Image (cartoon, grey):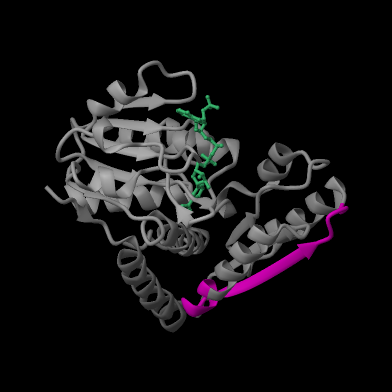
Amino acid sequence: MVATRIDGKAFAAKLRDRIAGQVAALKDEHGITPGLAVVLVGEDPASQVYVASKGKQTKAAGMNSYEHRLPDDASQAELLALIGRLNADPAVHGILVQLPLPKHIDEAEVINAIAVKKDVDGFTTANTGRLATGQKAMVPCTPLGCLMLLRDQLGDLSGKDAVVIGRSNIVGKPMAALLLADSATVTVAHSRTKDLSDVVRRADIVVAAVGRPQMVKGDWIKPGATVIDVGINRTDSGLVGDVDYDGVAAVAGAVTPVPGGVGPMTIACLLANTLTACCRANGLPDPQ
Ligand code: NDP
């Protein structure tokens, strides 16, 4: 069997087109333009690339993009003051603080300073709690993108056995919460999990969010399973995921490639969340 290659790049392009259409309609019908503010502290090269790409795609969707760059030695107070101004600015519907922040900054305090309704990354404690308790929330972009690909591939996820490898606050835990909300039976594995390959072999759905190049092998996979590879690992032979693509594709039913799988979905979901935040701020229904 050769697995279906889940084309996240094409899916994300369609999603961005749909969002651009909804943004244009919002402008025509209500005179409103969604705005996303991205805050970057310091000079981390990978973060600079991500922020530039987010700004470009925000504008391409017809939204306003506001970029705020602070020096590496910016103080916690300066950063909090900037977030306070963005919270109060009616033209800004979404605020994203690019992580990681420099070591002297208290990341949790900064994230939690973002107004819950503008928290388009879904990282505030309030949004995390809302997601965990089944309330309307802003959902973190990467797991939201994974969920969209899974629903598109499998339809109803109810009753499926899902294994999420990784328990970070930004990917693994919200991914598990989303799968649970869709009535999958969810196992969260991590570095202390015993017999990981046996645990993974039971799964109809595998989401790998570990950060270890090509760790998940073909003989870990139940025949026909759907495998979502979140990992982005830079190696001497280029960018690879957490999944050994060729080995897994020989057994799985469907698998996302790296690059071209989950990665493009993340920014598309950020745009979707910004549009949703804008609609909610203006008392309009969530875009479908
Ligand atoms: P973290 O480093 O925060 O978390 C990694 C998780 O993997 C931890 O829970 C850790 O367990 C677990 N882990 C580590 N080693 C093993 C092992 N040998 N067996 C089982 N579990 C293990 O990473 P993130 O969640 O932030 O990111 C994961 C990957 O996804 C990275 O490659 C990252 O670059 C990528 N990523 C991709 C995005 C995209 O847009 N496509 C967005 C965000 C991340 P423990 O908790 O016990 O330490």
Magenta segment: does it hold 65?
yes
Foreground of the two, 94 or 44 = 44
Q: Residue furthest top?
A: 194
Tell whether 169 sits left or right of 25: right
Viewer can see residue 184: no
Q: Is residue 271 left or right of residue 162?
A: right
Residue drawn at (36%, 63%), measured in percent from left and top? 287
Frontmost residue, 44 versus 171: 44
Horizontal side of 247 relative to 4 (left or right) equals: right
Q: Which residue lies at the image location 84% right of the left edge and 46% below the top edge?
A: 76
In the rendered image, residue 65, in percent from the top left (x then y), is placed at: 61, 72
Magenta stretch encompasses residue 59: yes
Q: Which residues are magenta?
A: 57-74
Q: Which residue occupies the foreground of this view, 213 or 19?
A: 213
Residue 55, compared with residue 171, is above or below; it is: below
Question: Whole-percent x and y of residue 233?
Answer: 51, 49
Viewer-proximal residue among 250 and 61: 250
Q: Residue furthest bottom?
A: 28
Residue at position x 44%, y 52% from top? 240
Q: Is residue 225 above or below residue 69?
A: above
The C terminus: image quadrant:
bottom left
Q: Is residue 199 left or right of residue 156?
A: right
